[in-house]
Image: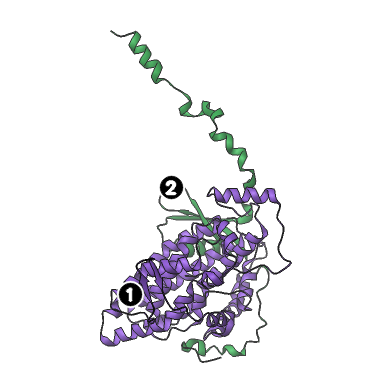
Amino acid sequence: MENSLDPRINRLSLIKNDGSFALEKGENWHTYEVFHLKKRGDHHKHVGSLHAPTPEIALVFAKEQFGRRQKCVNLWVVPSREVYTFNMEDEDMFATASSPEKKYRDASGFKVRDKIAEYKKTHAG
Amino acid sequence: MYGSSAAFDTPKKGEEIVEDPKKLAIFEARIERGEKIEPNDWMPHEYRRQLIRMIEQHAHSEIIGALPEGTWITRAPGFKRKLALIAKVQDEIGHGHLLYAAAETLGKSREEMINDLINGKSKYSNVFNYPAKTWADVTVIGFLIDAGAIVNQLINATGSYGPYCRALERICYEESFHLKQGHEGFVYLATGTPLQRKMLQDAINRWWEPIMHFFGPPDKISQHTEKLMKWKVKMATNDDMRQKFFDQYIPKVYELGLTIPDPKFKKNDETGKWEYTEPDWDRFFEVINGNGPCNKERLEVRRWAEEHGRWVRNALYDPKYKSVMPLA
C-alpha cells in the first residue's frame, strides 16, 4: 500500500492485517427506539433507533445522536423488542374512525345554526 | 454525503423472483398514491434487495467519507475551521448510523453490512477513493461534493420507503450547515491571494473527474432504471441529477472567476442542458472495483477500527439483552 497522506494512518502499520477479521453476530449489541422531547409541553416524538449494549449507554448514545444538533430537553429510549404494535397491513381496521358512519362522534355531525335561525325568524319581536 | 455511483445492479439470470400479482398490485397502487412503504409491509423481493443495497452503500459512504476529511482535522487552518470540520465529520458518522438503522429494518444486520464493507463486497461512493491532497481539496469536497450529495439526498427523500425518507430528512437538515461552511471555505480561497486561488483551481481540476463520476454512468449505459423509478426507489436518472447539480452550482464556481477543466463544458441555451466531455467511465469502474488511489487504505483503516474497537464492545456487552432489529 502506498504511503497515506495522513501520518497517523502510516503509524498504524495496517499492512500487518491478514484480512480475516469479521464482526460476529450480535457484536453491535441490540437496538433501542429513541423518543425526543424538543421543548417542555410537547409530546416525546419517535426520531429513530440506535444500537447500544444497555439502557444507560443507549441514553448516552441517544444524546450524542439525536440531541446533538436540534433543540432537546429530554430523551426516552425503549428497547425495540419491548414495543408492541399492530401490523401495518391491518390499517383498514382504523378506517371507521373517520368514516361518515361515525359522524355522531364528530363535532361536524351536529347542526344547530339552521334551527336557531328558524327559531329567531318565527319568534321575532 | 453520497451519490448514486453504482447503487443498483441487475439480478443475476435465474434469480428473478415471480411475485404474487395481487400483492404486487396493492403495493404498486400504494406507491402510486404517494403513500410510503413501512418495514413490515409486503414488498417485492427485488424492491427489498435494491433498497438494502442502496441504503447500505449510502451508510458506508457516510462512514468512509469521514476519512478523507478527517485526515485534515489535525491540519485545518485556524481554530474555527478545525471545530467546524470535527463537527461535520461527527455528523457524517451520525448519518451512517441513521442509515444503517434504516437498512436494518429491511432485514440485514449492521454486523453483516460492516463485514461486507470491509471484505469489499459492498461499495460506497467512488469519490472517497481519492485523496484530499491539500486544504483546497477539503473545500472542494466540502462545497461541491456535499452539494452533489444534497441534490441526490433531497430527491431520494421523496422516495417510497418510509425509514429511508425519514433518515434523509434529518440528514438534509444537518447537511445544510456542511454546505454553507464548505461554500465559505471555497469563497475564502477564491477571493484570497493568487496562491490561494491557484490552489483552489488546482483542486477543482483534480476533482472534476470524480465529480463527473459522482452521479453515476450516463443513462444510456445505466440499466435497471425503469422499474426502480416506478417503485420510487430511484427518483431521478443519473443524467438528470447531474444536470440539476450543474444548474445549481456551476454558476457559483463561475461567479468567482474559476474555470471547469473541460473545453466542451457549457450550457446550451436552446436545450437548457449542460454539454460536456464524457469522463472516462472505464476509469470509474476500475476505481469502484477496488483499484483507485485510496480504496485499500480506506478499507484497511475501517477494518483496523473495527478490530481495535472490539474489546470495547465486548467489555460493554451484557448477555442479558438479546439482539433485535430496529422498528422503524
Q: Residues within 10 Å of mark 2 (few under 14, many from 20)?
A: few
Residue A28 visible in image: no
Q: Position of residue B288 (x, y in %)?
A: 56, 79
Q: Name the mark nearer the viewer: 2 or 1.
A: 1
Q: Residue at x 65, y 65 (%)?
A: B108
> Can you tell which quarter of the image residue B122 is in?
bottom right
The amino acid at mark 1 is: Val
Q: Which residue is mark 2?
A: A42
Question: Is residue A42 shown left or right of residue B221?
Answer: left
Q: Compared to B160, does B142 lie above or below?
A: below
Question: Is residue B44 shown left or right of residue A110?
Answer: right
Question: Is residue B230 shown left or right of residue B195?
Answer: right
Question: Is residue B133 shown left or right of residue A31?
Answer: left
Q: Position of residue B156 (x, y in %)?
A: 50, 61
Q: Compared to B164, does B200 lie above or below?
A: below
Letter of the chain in green: A
The amino acid at mark 2 is: Asp
Of A119 and B76, nearer the camera is A119
SS at mark 2 in the image: loop
Disc sitting over residue B253 in the figure: 1
Q: Residue furthest front?
A: B270
Label 2 vs label 1: CA separation?
44 Å
